[in-house]
Image (cartoon, coloured by chain):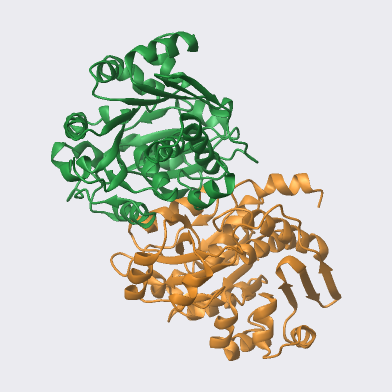
Chain colours: A green, B orange
Amino acid sequence: MTATRYDVLTVGNAIVDIIARAEEDFLVKENITKAAMNLIDAERAEHLYSVMGPAIEASGGSASNTAAGVASLGGQAAYFGKVADDHLGGIFTHDIRAIGVNFDTKPLDGTPPTARSMIFVTPDGERTMNTYLGACVELGPEDIDADVVASSKVTYFEGYLWDPPRAKDAIRLAAKIAHENDRQVAITLSDSFCVDRYRVEFLDLMRSGTVDIIFANDAEIKSLYQTVDLETALNALKNDVGLAVVTQGENGSIVVAPEGRVVVDAHPIERLEDTTGAGDLYASGFLFGLTQGRSMEDCAKIGGLAAAEVIEHIGPRPQVSLKDLLAQSGI
Amino acid sequence: MTATRYDVLTVGNAIVDIIARAEEDFLVKENITKAAMNLIDAERAEHLYSVMGPAIEASGGSASNTAAGVASLGGQAAYFGKVADDHLGGIFTHDIRAIGVNFDTKPLDGTPPTARSMIFVTPDGERTMNTYLGACVELGPEDIDADVVASSKVTYFEGYLWDPPRAKDAIRLAAKIAHENDRQVAITLSDSFCVDRYRVEFLDLMRSGTVDIIFANDAEIKSLYQTVDLETALNALKNDVGLAVVTQGENGSIVVAPEGRVVVDAHPIERLEDTTGAGDLYASGFLFGLTQGRSMEDCAKIGGLAAAEVIEHIGPRPQVSLKDLLAQSGI
């Protein structure tokens, strides 16, 4: 077995977020599905930016946020994702490296440009994403660094990677390398509409043993099994995958493990500002705990702690050291 | 007299902020003067970015933040400032227009690029700026739209404009046009080190009647009169300028008007996050009040309200409607 260098390797769409507050009416007027990740083309991106309020820019991308969270918790993290060699690509690269994540995927020379997601945060704190994938469509098997996969305890990827054309081939390759090296493979289902687009493929990833661990929220898991009943979905999960972690927002999370279920309350917060990154940071905390050999209950609690930090401010990545927060928490 | 179209026109360095948290030690190690605006060249900018933690990007620039504040309060605002025709210039232009400010200064075609300021926020909430002026060095008299100046109740500019080579000529022209149209001219002294660089010129602007109103904080006013005694400085101010507004952070503000002094407490806050923009937003509130014919006391209170909003979050511009906050405040 290759020596371990990383606790968690994540693979995903490398995106810079453009974040603004918006009223509910705005989403209706612009025909945007609330709380979802809406895929948009360049023309739609231009239109939405023209009607968007004053914004801030922050590096984002689901799996990149998770890698950032692992690093902030003090874990060793690596990331694969495709930016272009442009201004936003430079920002993305700076930020993920600055938080301590190993990131060496070759940037795309030329167009399309680095991906961006216009995120509207409504007064209820919910985030609604509008993503132009840009350079992400070029991520492929050639971007999988086998040595990094082999030396990572867990390789984790986004369901969102089924949207660009060749990323799924990259993931299948990474999963193969991981399993050949007795490593674990994890997926997040990303978004209930994404699940709807790729339900058969996601179920196949689970049932074929390509993934060992899945992360999903309530809506995603119900979409996966096309049921409105969470209990039905949780029972189905048990048969389909080794370990499943289901987040329920303010209602905490449920771990479905071979040894039984673990239910954990949400970490308390002062004020919900912006849900962007909640699931990503939960996954970072859970995976950090898992790779440190913590109990399922502790993993879920660390996930909750990381998610709580990120939803108390605008932006999808931690603004303070999660390592310090964890030390203070007594978990 | 030209018909009034704008309450406040502001003129300044058009800058995008790159904001990260940092420890006190970092500032010492990198030889950065804390709480100041440190001017840097392109090489130093590259170095500081390479050692900077994960950051967010947000449109900034002192006078542009003030224009944004006026617009957020419901006033009519315009802005002159020079960006380049590049990615950051696009962000700056979007954000200032999106908040409702009229901004039509012709962008610079080619290099240098749009200005950026790397801002380090220490655990005490203080911000320390490192500004690469870029395209701002090209602002000149040709960028002064006489019709906009003539139709603005107040033209307000930054002392920082004495750093680039030709902006001071633009300001002298704007002040002349304003006074020919019976409008008022205001300056902020910007920064105590900036005052140290241009003390004679700033005093001359005041004593020659080129400016009618000055904004300054405690440190700037002491630097202007080279005294450690605030009272000495306040007395000197009374003789040198028609109206002076001195901010004192958590100790509130003092208005030195011909009819006497007005002292107002700071607006209460829940938690200090980042002082960036505090003075800029105070000025926006004061000028908004002034142009609405409010009393000196109300002007100072509205200034305090606007400053309080901006220091409770990361980033130099309001994240919520100041108009709504003002309506709720009962001021």
Q: From this viewpoint, is residue B153 visible? A: no
Q: Quadrant of residue B258?
A: bottom right
Judge from the rendering whether residue B76 lies leftward or rightward of residue B96; answer left or right.
right
Instruction: Name the residue furthest right.
Output: B259
Q: Quadrant of residue A294?
A: top left
Q: Quadrant of residue B193?
A: bottom right
Instruction: Judge whether A45 appears above or below B131 on screen.
Output: above
Judge from the rendering whether residue B222 lies leftward or rightward of residue B50; answer left or right.
right
Front position in the image: A12 or A29: A12
Q: Position of residue B319 (x, y in %)?
A: 59, 48
Quadrant, the N terminus of chain A: top left
Judge from the rendering whether residue A219 lies leftward or rightward of residue B328; answer left or right.
left
Front position in the image: B103 or A43: A43
Q: Position of residue B152 (x, y in %)?
A: 62, 63
Judge from the rendering whether residue B331 lies leftward or rightward of residue A133; answer left or right.
right
Q: From this viewpoint, is residue B248 visible? A: yes
Q: Residue at x 42, y 42 (%)?
A: A50
Quadrant, the C terminus of chain A: top right
Q: How many marks?
A: 0
Q: Residue at x 42, y 60 (%)?
A: B53
Instruction: Judge whether B200 appears above or below A330 on screen.
Output: below
Instruction: Judge whether A179 appears above or below B75 on screen.
Output: above
Q: Position of residue A110 (x, y in %)?
A: 18, 49
Q: Position of residue B2 (x, y in %)?
A: 62, 63
Q: Residue at x 37, y 39 (%)?
A: A291
Instruction: Judge whether B115 appears above or below A236 on screen.
Output: below
